[in-house]
């Protein structure tokens, strides 16, 4: 197992860029089997012209999905391709002359895929091996010079030069070695004489061509017989057949036959397998008498596509011939395509542009040719499509705008169907969720708000509630209310109103006075908690309504210090003459300021009347001598509020 580093070499067979995203090219490395774990096979960064510093971010890796073994790793620190598991060429490739492992190097962002062909070279780690330690041959003493006696050849698990190259027969008087392409024979070079020699033992050595050379030996024991005998002869030197991989167990795959010219027991031929592995022995059975080779266990084209069986035909005296049976396994569409998600970006921000790649899909079908050709499709009515990428890779890309507020997630089903007949198909559902972007400002439920409040309200009383909705997610949809700065009558709005940031309830901060102002407007802002935040503004108009909080005020006659007022009335006044007029005002408005005048008390109730609305005091009749010189009136002024307020006043009507 001497390994020289010069045995490791690399060849970049060309890198083509299919598009900006896709690169495809084959890397080829060649190295001996059985190298230590951690041995460096090549450097992919150098050979693919990749920046070492980006390997990690681009998730450079060997793609092993679909195969169960993981033989190689990429060292992200330097781009070395290193061996991560034992590579036994014989276990991997058996008798195949060339042992190539196909792997894929995958990079994301953008997706790149590189095929790597890893040629595992044979080292001479297996010796030639004979099927038996001792070969018994019976040879008649009458055998003619030049008669040939087949010997089962030796097997070496290595290939090429490392497999069996030559044979050496121990020096002796009677036999020499005849070696053909497919056979080893003892050739009688000098006649036998049983009377002189009953038995001969010879050592046969098989040598391979490896360095260092390995050998295997077998002892050939020859019994010299009295009688005449013939060797069985196979009808064909090599038998070939093919069968589909789904051939039922118990089927006779092929029948071998050999004839022996002898009669009786000497002509009875029995068949058996020669040197075959235990696994193959478990799959096929040979009927010793009939030569029928029967299938005992299911075969799988994807695992082994060809069997080579050595068969022997032996007559009653033990003379043996050798032949070979080659069974070709043909593919049947027995593997459904398998869909793999290689990369998935979920959640997807709702503002991604059309054509954004959200997942990488790989489809594999273990069958061959048409049975392994796969078509992929995607369900309809989703804003996604599959774009073929490299080989059996697809990109799942968006085809339109996403809106989380309308659809917050998708289950996208991908279908894969092969072209076998009948075709097999499979599907896979990918869950994609849409992430929120703060793309909706809060919207007030009303275009504007009005609040009505009676004056003299209590500070802290609720005026109204504003409310805005924002369909975005969490903080992007959390609404906070605030008053926009401004002035009402020269004072800051915040000295009049406050808004609860969470609930939008607007409170009066102070008591309002209708007589000072009747309405005012403020701006309320609803802002979400996104970053950056979005907002909308709304106008809130506050209308103050009047309360009957002012009593009528009498302006004339002016009450100076006391409520007494003296007016002089001419003695000759006729009925209906205007004597005086009471003038009063009320700071309130409307009904609250609608005044009426009444005489509530008079010395002579029939003498004066007051106009309800104008406050004019007139005589009701001519004044006569009998009337008192001094008439006393009490006048009340009432407003029409609920309850009404009044002022009273006592003019003295003095008649002269
Ligand atoms: C996707 O499928 C899962 C599992 O069946 C289900 O829980 C989820 O609600 C589905 N989502 C959508 C957007 O249909
Ligand atoms: C809110 O939106 C911003 C972008 O506008 C996004 O980055 C963030 O993740 C969103 N928040 C949530 C809780 O979805
Ligand atoms: C609301 O008013 C504030 C202050 O004037 C302003 O900064 C903001 O942009 C306004 N918002 C909208 C949506 O008009």
Image: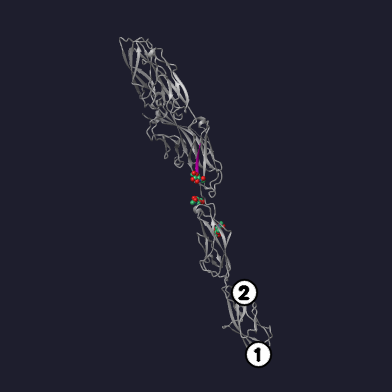
Label 2 near ligand 3 (CB < 8 Å): no
Front-most of residues 510 and 103:
510
Residue 75 position, x and y percent, is 41, 38
User: Measuring 50% from the left and 52% from the top, which residue is drawn there?
Assistant: 473
Residue pushed farthest left?
A: 196
Picture colour scheme: one colour
Residue occupying image coordinates x 55% and y 45%: 353
How many residues crowd around disc 1 within 10 Å: few (fewer than 14), some, or many (20 or more)?
Answer: few
The magenta region covers 426-431
- Tell me the quarter of the picture where residue 611 sits: bottom right
| Nearer to us in this view, 79 or 617 | 617
Image mark for residue 626: 1
Real-space CA distance between mark 1 and mark 2, rounded to the nearest whole angstrom: 38 Å
Q: Is residue 537 above or below residue 81?
A: below
Q: Of all residues shown, which one is farthest toward the bottom? A: 625
Residue 21 visible in the displayed image: no
Where residue 169 sits, quadrant-wise, is top left
């Amino acid at each position: 197992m001497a390994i020289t580093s010069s045995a490791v070499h690399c060849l970049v067979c060309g890198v083509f860029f299919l598009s900006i995203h896709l690169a495809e090219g084959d890397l080829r490395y060649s190295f001996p089997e059985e190298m230590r774990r951690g041995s460096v096979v090549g450097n992919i960064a150098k050979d693919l012209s990749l920046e070492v510093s980006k390997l990690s971010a681009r998730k450079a890796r060997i793609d092993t999905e679909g195969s169960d073994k993981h033989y190689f790793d990429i060292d992200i620190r330097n781009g070395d391709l290193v061996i991560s598991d034992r590579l036994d060429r014989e276990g991997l490739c058996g008798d195949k002359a060339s042992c190539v492992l196909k792997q894929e190097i995958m990079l994301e962002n953008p997706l790149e895929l590189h095929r790597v062909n890893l040629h595992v070279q044979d080292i001479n780690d297996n010796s030639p091996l004979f099927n038996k330690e001792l070969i018994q041959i019976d040879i008649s003493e009458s055998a003619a010079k030049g008669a040939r006696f087949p010997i089962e050849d030796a097997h070496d698990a290595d290939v090429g030069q490392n497999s069996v190259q030559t044979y050496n027969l121990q020096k002796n008087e009677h036999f020499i070695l005849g070696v053909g392409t497919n056979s080893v024979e003892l050739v009688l070079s000098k006649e036998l004489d049983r009377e002189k020699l009953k038995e001969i033992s010879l050592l046969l050595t098989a040598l391979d061509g490896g360095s260092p050379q390995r050998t295997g030996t077998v002892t050939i024991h020859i019994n010299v017989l009295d009688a005449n005998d013939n060797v069985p002869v196979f009808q064909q030197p090599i038998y070939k057949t093919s069968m589909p991989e789904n051939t039922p167990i118990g089927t006779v795959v092929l029948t071998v036959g050999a004839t022996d010219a002898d009669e009786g027991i000497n002509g009875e031929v029995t068949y058996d397998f020669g040197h075959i592995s235990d696994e193959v022995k478990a799959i096929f059975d040979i009927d010793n008498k009939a030569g029928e080779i029967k299938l005992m266990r299911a075969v799988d084209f994807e695992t082994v596509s060809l069997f080579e069986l050595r068969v022997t035909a032996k007559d009653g005296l033990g003379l043996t011939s050798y032949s070979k049976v080659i069974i070709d396994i043909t593919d049947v569409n027995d593997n459904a395509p398998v869909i793999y998600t290689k990369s998935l970006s979920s959640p997807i921000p709702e503002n991604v542009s059309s054509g954004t790649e959200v997942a990488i899909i790989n489809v594999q079908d273990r069958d061959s040719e048409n049975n392994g050709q796969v078509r992929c499709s995607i369900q309809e009515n989703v804003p996604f499509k599959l774009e073929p990428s490299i080989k059996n890779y697809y990109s799942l890309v968006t085809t339109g705008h996403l809106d989380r507020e309308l659809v917050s997630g998708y289950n996208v089903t991908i279908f894969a169907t092969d072209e076998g007949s009948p075709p097999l198909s499979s599907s896979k559902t990918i869950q994609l969720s849409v992430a929120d972007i703060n793309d909706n400002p809060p919207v007030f439920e009303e275009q504007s708000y009005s609040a009505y409040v009676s004056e003299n309200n209590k500070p802290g009383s609720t005026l109204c509630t504003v409310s805005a909705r924002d369909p975005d997610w969490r903080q992007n949809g959390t609404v906070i209310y605030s008053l926009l700065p401004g002035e009402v009558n020269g004072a800051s709005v915040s000295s009049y109103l406050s808004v609860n940031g969470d609930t939008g309830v607007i409170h009066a901060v102070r008591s309002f006075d209708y007589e000072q102002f009747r309405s005012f407007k403020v701006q309320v802002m609803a802002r979400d908690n996104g970053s950056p935040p979005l907002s909308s503004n709304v106008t809130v108009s506050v209308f103050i309504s009047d309360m009957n909080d002012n009593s009528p005020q009498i302006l004339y006659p002016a009450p100076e210090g006391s409520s007494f007022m003296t007016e002089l009335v001419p003695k000759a006044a006729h009925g209906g003459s205007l004597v005086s007029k009471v003038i009063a005002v009320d700071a309130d408005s409307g009904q609250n300021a609608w005044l009426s005048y009444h005489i509530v008390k008079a010395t002579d109730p029939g003498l004066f009347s007051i106009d309800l609305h104008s406050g004019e005091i007139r005589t009701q009749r001519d004044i006569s001598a009998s009337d008192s010189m001094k008439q006393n009136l009490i006048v009340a002024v009432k407003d029409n509020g609920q309850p009404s307020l009044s002022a009273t006043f006592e003019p003295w009507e003095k008649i002269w």
